[in-house]
């Protein structure tokens, strides 16, 4: 069949390079999109998948390189350009308006109007209804998007892209929030779209899924295209091997500083989710002194929520948390910090840093009580401490008083780490500490983590990058759907086991019952 | 920048840029000097000592309000109630001096000593701020709405206290031991009016808090990134509560000074003062988006507005034109501020 209908390339990216301040997100990548096929993109987080798709969809422009559509060079400078060329994208982070209803969301910025200005709500609703029926989704087109659960919102996002009549549809992790039943529906739709000649670019971390629906696969690693192949020539182990690369040396140079003495004990921690169920579902574990405990899981597995509960951010969480023999279940964030818990949040920009403040002021924000006599901040003491910390963490910065925004991502992250260390923590909670920083800075962060563990600090850290978690953890727990679905020692852990455990619990029945 | 590769030209342009940046940073101060210079030439008597003192006394009231406002705006909020609290504070103090406090259950009227009256008035101001702060932190009412409500409530309360009438002749009575109130507005120490001393004291205190105390740092961090502040253990709600209370407190001080200067309190005093205070803060470089601003800048901003107003009056500019000109100055200040920030981020990129 394939030989008979020679597959043709509809869209081609040639030698595409994208530079961000401090990082090379894409390095001379060639990528082919075949007409009427599912073109799969895989790679670990930060490998450049999202950047590549954003370039194709006009969200980002490439620093160098060219795009060819139907053999002709095109410039896709904006989302509108992409739309003109028939390229649509379903974003990983949902771009919906919770305050508008489903139909209004589907037709936002291309409203169906009478005489050019009067919105024809009935027409929009009926079109939305037929789109949603095609998606076999039981969603009321007049309902507010904010009232839908995440999986349903994802369906609306897909409907929005379908409404565009796209020739090329980019799906960035479309199944991350879907139940198994919903995934089946999505796959049927993908088949349907293929039959109609729509080309699909598909990104997912769920490898079995990729093998099932993909026609072609391209693997990215550290911003480079590693390998491309037709899907029927390869299998899951091949994908993992390509993603991980030279993995042989990953377990060397690791010294465990774990003492076996308990630092943190969490018992039956649970956080109710809006709309039923638990975001953190009866989680129990212990963390030893000097231990680095990795928490692996997919997006939305409840890892960040777990950290927020530990820091005392959710007043409605239940369970018991014991730090160094002291009950720290109750209390404000400030009290938790003083008792020896420190959080390095997932989103540096939104949660970790105050952009308008200097490096020094950011670094000392959580620990000002240590630099105070009466009401007075002792400037000299601060200056000295910040200088030492900048040296210790090897932060590249012109001086302690420059604005935080002028630093590269890796150095900003080190400032956030410095901020946490200033509080004198016993247990450090690191949520995706290497997100969005370059390879060099990543390994520096790992060195810092190892050094801290060597000094007896316990580290609980979250990442969705397999290689990272395998490289640095003494022990690994896997979360899925708010629950712990696997626990591995460093020696036992294999990447396959982790991936399998992270997909546990995505059963249709659970979602249907909500 | 790579100085070795391109030694001459970039160094020069960079030097120029630095000078330009410095001028931009000092823009409010330069504007003040220009305004003063202009009026000194155009309006005779402008530079006379007597006029200066009168002008600074005007400015002091706006500056005191603007100091409280600056903290609120730095946290990302706004306080629309300051003008009304000025009026209410004047009426509270005036009422306590003129009528005393009538306690119906005992059938007696209590006259307080002056320091007590001042304390009560300041307390009322802070309480008004506390109510706004409570609504904002506990009920998540938008600051604009909460303080808009307080604007009406405080003004209404001021009118209720006297049924809309003025409390005249607030000199106190010997037998009640509440003499001396006019000293606040008309007195002087070391030849400098008391109200200016108050501005100096309050300004120094506020600048110290902003720059050198944990509270100040927390105020900036709440406005810069509330979520990051929360995760750093900053008690965000408490910080917000404090800034609204302080703003109410500053308003009460201004109300006391005005009532004392006039030796009378009128319930309509202070209408639209909130807008002047906001304008002063913005002129001084405070960002309405939160996180940025300084007490020094705000005080200079208050001087620009005050001097501009008084100077135009002396020159006989029509009050209608005065409004137009003030409006233009405020908008221009924000435009220049935006320009400076763009330039700054570009310079930061170049340095990289």
Image (tube, rainbow, N blue to C red):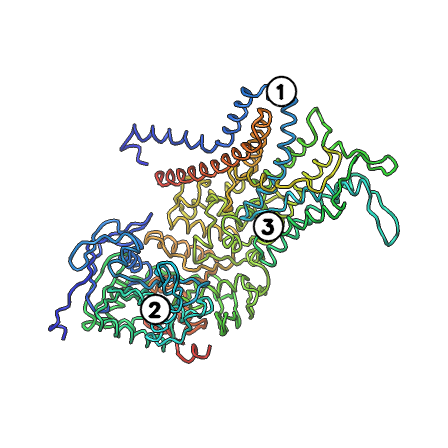
Look at the numbered disc 1 and give the secondary structure of its residue: loop
The numbered disc on residue A504 is none
Q: Which residue is mark 3?
A: B239
In the image, A397: left or right of A226? right
Front position among marks 3 and 2: 2
| Marks 3 and 1 close (CB-CB < 8 Å) | no
Q: Residues within 10 Å of mark 2 (few under 14, many from 20)?
A: many
Image disc number at residue A159:
2
Q: Position of residue A510 (x, y in %)?
A: 43, 78
Taking the image as shown, residue A300 lies to the left or right of residue B201, namely left
Residue name at image x 44 percent, y 31 percent: B22
Image quarter (top left, top right, bottom left or bottom right) of the N terminus of chain B: top left
The single residue placed furthest to the front in the displayed view is: A115
From the viewer's side, name the closer residue of B99 and B127. B99
Image quadrant assignment for residue A463? bottom left
For label 2, the SS is: helix
Does B223 appear above or below A128?
A: above
**Which chain does the numbered disc 2 sit on?**
A
What whole-number distance in Å separates the C-alpha atoms at marks 3 and 1? 43 Å
Near-viewer residue (A409 or A237): A409
Check the image and report above or below for B242 versus B45. below
Rate crowding at label 3 as few (under 14), some (14 to 19) or many (20 or more) other CA atoms within 10 Å: many
Q: Residue at x 71, y 49 (%)?
A: B157
Q: Which mark is residue B48?
A: 1
The answer to whether one can see residue A31 in this image is: yes
The first of marks 3 and 1 along the sequence is: 1
Q: Residue at x 13, y 71 (%)?
A: A5
Could you say whether the residue bearing mark 3 is in a helix, strand or loop? helix
Q: Foreground residue, A507 or B94?
A: B94
Viewer-proximal residue among B229 and B163:
B163
Q: Is residue A378 visible?
A: no
């Amino acid at each position: 069949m394939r030989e008979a209908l020679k597959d043709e390339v509809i869209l081609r990216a040639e030698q595409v390079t994208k530079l961000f301040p401090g990082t090379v997100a894409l390095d001379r990548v060639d990528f082919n999109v075949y007409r009427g096929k599912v073109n799969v993109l895989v790679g670990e987080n930060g490998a450049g998948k999202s950047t590549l798709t954003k370039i194709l969809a006009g969200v980002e422009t490439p620093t160098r390189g060219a795009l060819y559509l139907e053999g002709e060079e095109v410039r896709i400078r904006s989302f509108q350009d992409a739309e003109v060329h028939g390229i649509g994208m379903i974003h990983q982070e949902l771009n919906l308006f919770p305050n508008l209803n489903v139909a209004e969301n589907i037709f936002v910025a291309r409203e169906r109007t009478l005489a050019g200005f009067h919105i024809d709500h009935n027409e929009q609703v009926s079109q939305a209804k037929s789109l949603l029926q095609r998606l076999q989704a039981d969603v009321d087109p007049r309902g507010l998007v904010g009232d839908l659960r995440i999986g349903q919102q994802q369906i609306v996002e897909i409907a929005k892209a379908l409404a565009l009549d796209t020739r090329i549809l980019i799906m960035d992790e479309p199944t991350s929030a879907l139940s198994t039943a919903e995934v089946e529906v999505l796959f049927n739709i993908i088949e349907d779209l293929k039959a109609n000649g729509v080309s699909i670019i598909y990104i997912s971390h769920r490898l079995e899924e990729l093998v099932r629906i993909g026609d072609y696969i391209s693997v990215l690693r550290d911003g480079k295209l590693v390998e491309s192949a037709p899907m029927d020539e390869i299998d899951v182990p091949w994908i993992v091997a390509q993603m991980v690369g030279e993995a042989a040396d990953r377990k060397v140079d690791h010294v465990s500083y774990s003492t076996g003495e308990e630092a943190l004990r969490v018992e039956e921690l649970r956080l109710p989710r809006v709309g039923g169920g638990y975001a953190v579902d009866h989680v129990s574990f212990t963390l030893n002194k000097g231990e680095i405990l990795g928490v692996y899981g997919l997006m939305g597995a409840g890892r960040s929520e777990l950290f927020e509960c530990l820091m005392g951010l959710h007043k409605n969480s239940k369970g018991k948390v014991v730090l160094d023999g002291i009950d720290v279940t109750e209390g404000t964030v400030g009290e938790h910090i003083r008792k020896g818990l420190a959080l390095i949040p997932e989103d540096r920009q939104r949660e970790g840093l105050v952009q308008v403040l200097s490096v020094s002021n950011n670094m000392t924000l959580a620990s000002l009580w240590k630099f105070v006599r009466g009401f007075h901040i002792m400037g000299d003491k601060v200056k000295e401490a910040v200088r030492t910390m900048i040296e210790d963490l090897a932060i590249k910065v012109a001086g302690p008083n420059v604005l935080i925004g002028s630093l590269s991502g890796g150095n900003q992250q080190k400032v956030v780490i410095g901020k946490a260390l200033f509080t004198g923590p016993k247990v450090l909670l690191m949520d995706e500490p290497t997100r969005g920083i370059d390879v060099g800075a990543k390994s520096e962060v790992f060195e810092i983590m190892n050094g801290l563990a060597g000094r007896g600090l316990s580290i609980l850290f979250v990442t969705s990058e397999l290689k990272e978690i395998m490289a640095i953890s003494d022990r690994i727990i896997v979360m899925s759907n708010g629950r712990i679905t696997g626990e591995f020692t460093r020696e036992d852990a294999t990447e396959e086991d982790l991936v399998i455990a992270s997909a546990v619990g995505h059963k249709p029945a659970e979602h249907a019952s909500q | 920048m790579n100085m070795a590769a391109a030694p001459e030209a970039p160094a020069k342009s960079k030097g120029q840029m630095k000078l330009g940046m410095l001028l931009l940073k000092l823009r409010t101060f330069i504007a003040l000097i220009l305004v003063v210079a202009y009026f000194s030439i155009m309006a005779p008597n402008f530079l006379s000592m007597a006029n200066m003192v009168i002008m600074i006394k005007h400015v002091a009231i706006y500056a005191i309000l603007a100091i409280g406002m600056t903290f609120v705006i730095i946290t990302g909020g706004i306080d629309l109630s300051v003008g009304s609290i000025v009026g209410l504070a004047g009426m509270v103090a005036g009422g306590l001096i003129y009528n005393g406090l009538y306690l119906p259950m005992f059938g007696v009227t209590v006259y307080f000593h002056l320091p007590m009256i001042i304390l009560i008035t300041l307390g009322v101001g802070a309480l008004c701020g506390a109510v706004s702060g409570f609504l904002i932190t506990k009920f998540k009412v938008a600051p604009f709405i909460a303080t808009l409500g307080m604007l009406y409530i405080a003004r209404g309360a001021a009118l209720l206290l006297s049924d809309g009438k003025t409390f005249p002749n607030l000199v106190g009575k010997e037998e009640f031991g509440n003499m001396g109130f006019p000293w606040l507005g008309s007195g002087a120490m070391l030849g400098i009016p008391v109200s200016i001393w108050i501005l100096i004291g309050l300004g120094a205190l506020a600048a110290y808090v902003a720059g050198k105390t944990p509270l100040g740092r927390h105020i900036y961090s709440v406005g810069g990134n509330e979520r990051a502040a929360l995760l750093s253990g900053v008690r965000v709600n408490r910080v917000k509560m404090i800034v609204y209370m302080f703003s109410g407190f500053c308003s009460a001080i201004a109300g006391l000074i005005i009532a004392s200067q006039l030796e009378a309190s009128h319930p309509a005093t202070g209408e639209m003062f909130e807008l002047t205070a906001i304008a002063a803060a913005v002129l001084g470089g405070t960002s309405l988006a939160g996180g940025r601003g300084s007490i020094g800048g705000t005080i200079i901003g208050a001087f620009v507005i005050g001097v501009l107003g008084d100077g135009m009056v002396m020159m006989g500019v029509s009050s209608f034109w005065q409004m137009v000109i003030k409006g233009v100055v405020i908008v221009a200040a924000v435009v220049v501020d935006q320009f400076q920030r763009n330039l700054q981020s570009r310079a930061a990129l170049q340095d990289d």
